[in-house]
Image (cartoon, grey):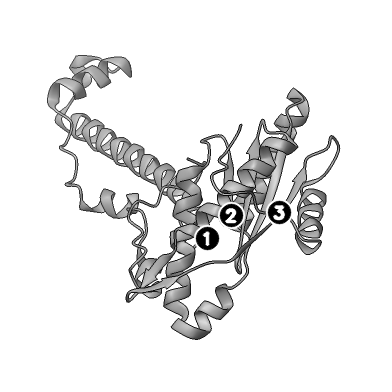
Amino acid sequence: MAEVIPTDKVSPLAPTGERRQDRPPDPYRARAARPAADPPDPASTLDTASILGIPSGELTPEVFAAIRALMAETERLRADLEATRRHEAYLGRLADRHSWLPLYNRRAFLREMSRALVRAEHSRVSCVFLYLNLVNLADLRRRHGRAAGDRAMVHAASLLRDRLHPSDLLGSMDGYDFVILLMATGREAGTAVARDLIAMLEADPAYWFEHPLSLHVACGLHVFAVGESVRQVIDAAETDLRDGGVARSPAGQGIRR
C-alpha cells in the first residue's frame, strides 16, 4: 500500500460536494466540547506556595486565592497551547490532502518526492517515476456526468493505493493524472509494475448505476538519475508518455520487485 494521507471516511459513492465537506475532526472543536478543568486543590496550592518560597505564615487567604487563580490560568494556557499545536498539525494534514481523492495533492507530492530523491541520491538507491494518465476520463464525464468521472477517479486511486508498496509515493497532478515514485526499483522492475498497474486499472472498472466506467490508461516512465531535479524527472516521464509510454504486457504478468 502506498504512502498516502489516510481518508478512510471518503466514500467513492458520495456526491462530490459531500466528499469535500468530509474532513478530519478539528481539535479546536474537541477542545471546546470538553468541560472546563477543575480548579487546583488546596494541597497543590500549598505545594506551589512552598516552591515559590512563600512562608506559610504569610500565606493569607488573599495570597492563597491569588496563587490558585494563577495556577488555574497556567493550566488553561497549557491546554490552549496543546490544542493550538494539534490544530496546526490538523491544518498541515488537511493542506496535504487532495480535496476528494485518498492521496497526496500536487503540492504535497512534489515536496515528498523532492525529499525522497535526496535520500535516494545519498544512499545510491534507484527510483522509478511513473506518470499515469486516464486517457478516456473526459469522455466518461461527457457521457455519464462529472460525478461518474469522480467516482472512476476515486476507484482508481483506491486501487493504486492498495496495490503499491508502503515506501512508494502516490499523488495527483490534478486533472486526470496520477503520479507514483517507486523506491528501490530499477527500470525492469519498474516497467513490470507499470504494466501491472495499467492492467489492474483497466480490468477492474468502477460502476455508475450499473454502467461500467472502463478506463483506458497510458503511462510514462523515467528512471531517476543522480543530479536530476523533480521537474526534470517529471518532464522526462511526460516526454516518455507522449512518445508512447510503457507497452502493455501479456496477460498474467504481475509485479516483480
Q: Nearer the viewer, residue 32 or 77?
A: 32
Compared with residue 41, is residue 109 higher up or lower down, i.e. above or below? below
Residue 97 appears in the figure: no
Task: Work out how far the residue at label 1 is from the one at label 2, CA to CA, in angstroms.
Answer: 6 Å
Q: Nearer the viewer, mark 3 or mark 2?
A: 3
| Residue at position x 16%, y 36% in the image | 39
| Residue at position x 28%, y 18% in the image | 54
Q: Residues within 10 Å of mark 2 (few under 14, many from 20)?
A: many
Secondary structure found at label 2: helix
Asked if marks 1 and 2 touch (Cβ < 8 Å), the reply is yes
Q: Which residue carries the number 3 mark?
A: 247
| Residue at position x 66%, y 47% in the image | 111
Kind of residue at badge 2: Ile
Q: Residues within 10 Å of mark 3 (few under 14, many from 20)?
A: some
Kind of residue at badge 3: Ala
Task: Work out how far the residue at label 3 is from the one at label 1, CA to CA, in angstroms.
Answer: 14 Å
Kind of residue at badge 1: Glu
- Which image quadrant for residue 38? top left
- Residue 2: horizontal and vertical position, in percent? 51, 42
Work out which quarter of the rendered image holds the C terminus and state it. Answer: top right
| Residue at position x 84%, y 34% in the image | 226
Q: Is residue 120 left or right of residue 215?
A: right
Q: Which residue carries the number 2 mark?
A: 198
Q: Nearer the viewer, residue 47 or 195?
A: 195
Task: Work out how far the residue at label 3 is from the one at label 2, CA to CA, in angstroms.
Answer: 10 Å
What mark, if any, has residue 114 been given in the picture?
none
Mark earlier in primary sequence (3, 2): 2
Q: Which residue carries the number 1 mark?
A: 202
Secondary structure found at label 3: loop
Secondary structure found at label 1: helix
